Amino acid sequence: MPLATNRIAPGHPELVQGDNRQEKRGGHLVTITKYRCDRCGTAWEYENDKANLHAGWSVVGR
């Protein structure tokens, strides 16, 4: 379960991109990309879904 989601969250300077996956949302597919902070180890995901105003960055672990 994501800890926080904010489509317009400020950037994080030391994120390293990981794998991505597609998930079905309603009648369409969205792309979710994993990231990890090299400095603090926080795990993030970015959900790219233009149909959902609440999609965007989520903290998913530490």
Image (spheres, helix red, strand yellow):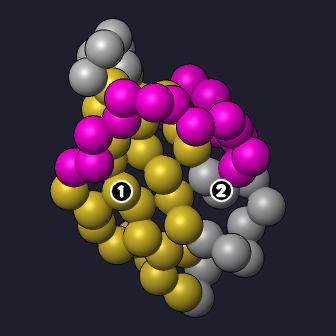
Q: Residue furthest left?
A: 19
What is the span of residues highlighted in magenta in the rendered image? 1-18
Q: CA distance from mark 2 to mark 1?
A: 12 Å
Q: Which percent across, then down, holds residue 28? A: 54, 87
Q: Nearer the viewer, residue 55 or 39?
A: 39
User: Which amino acid is tagged 2?
Assistant: Ala
Give the residue number, with chain letter if any, for mark 1. Answer: 33
Give the residue number, with chain letter if any, for mark 2. Answer: 55
Residue at x 68%, y 75% (from the top left corner): 50
Q: Is residue 10 left or right of residue 16?
A: right
Tell me the quarter of the picture where residue 62 sits. top left
- Which mark, by number, is residue 19? none
**Does the magenta-highlighted stretch encompass residue 49?**
no
Residue at x 40%, y 61% (from the top left corner): 32
The secondary structure type at the circle numbered 2 is loop
Question: Magenta stretch: dominant SS?
Answer: loop
Q: Is residue 22 visible?
A: yes
